[in-house]
Each structure stands twice: as C-alpha cells, then as structure tokens.
C-alpha cells in the first residue's frame, strides 16, 4: 500500500499530529490543576537540622 503524496494529505497528517499534542497537553494541565498531592512531613518540619543532608521546604504548608 502506498501513501498518497498530495499536499492535502500531509497537511491533514500534520493537523492530526498537532491536535494530538494539544489534547495531550490539555489533559496534563487538567490533571495538574485538579489533583491534590498528599501532605508529607518534611525534613525540617520540626525545626531540627535535616537528616542525612536532605533538603526540606522553607515553610511546609501542612
């Protein structure tokens, strides 16, 4: 089977690829804006020095 070599075919193929990328990015933005990550304790949550050189948040939100 040979693919058509017309300009319209390649424009349609490029449009489909662009639509796929836009839909995937929209899904990532939706998931990132609606998810709530669980609150985890930070290395500096109790005011002590970090254990084993771990970094922690300056001010944990939980």
Image (cartoon, rainbow, N blue to C red):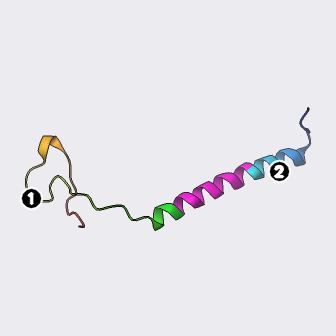
Residue range of the region highlighted in magenta in the rendering: 17-29
Image quarter (top left, top right, bottom left or bottom right) of the C terminus: bottom left
* Image position, residue 59 (x, y; %): 20, 63
Q: Mark 2 = which residue?
A: 12
Outermost residue on the left side: it is 48
Image quarter (top left, top right, bottom left or bottom right) of the N terminus: top right
User: Residue 2 or 37: which is nearer the viewer?
Assistant: 37
Quarter of the image where one finds residue 39: bottom left
Outermost residue on the top side: it is 1
Q: Identify the element where label 2 is drawn.
A: helix
* Image position, residue 47 (x, y; %): 9, 58
User: Residue 27 or 38: which is nearer the viewer?
Assistant: 38
Of the numbered discs 1 and 2, the one sitting upstream in the chain is 2
Which of the numbered marks, if any, corresponds to residue 5? none
* Image position, residue 46 (x, y; %): 10, 59
The prevailing secondary structure element of the residues shown in magenta is: helix
Does residue 45 sit above or below 3 in this rendering? below
Is 26 magenta? The answer is: yes
* Image position, residue 4 (x, y; %): 92, 39
Q: Mark 1 = which residue?
A: 47
Q: Identify the element where label 1 is drawn.
A: loop
Crowding near the residue tagged with mark 2, few <14, some 14–19, many ≥20 C-alpha atoms within 10 Å: few
Quarter of the image where one finds residue 52: top left
Crowding near the residue tagged with mark 1, few <14, some 14–19, many ≥20 C-alpha atoms within 10 Å: few
**15 to the left or right of 31:** right
């Amino acid at each position: 089977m040979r693919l058509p070599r017309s300009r319209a075919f390649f424009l349609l193929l490029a449009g489909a690829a662009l639509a796929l990328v836009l839909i995937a990015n929209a899904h990532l933005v939706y998931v990132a804006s609606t998810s709530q990550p669980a609150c985890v304790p930070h290395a500096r949550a109790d005011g002590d020095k970090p254990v084993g050189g771990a970094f922690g948040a300056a001010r944990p939100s939980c």
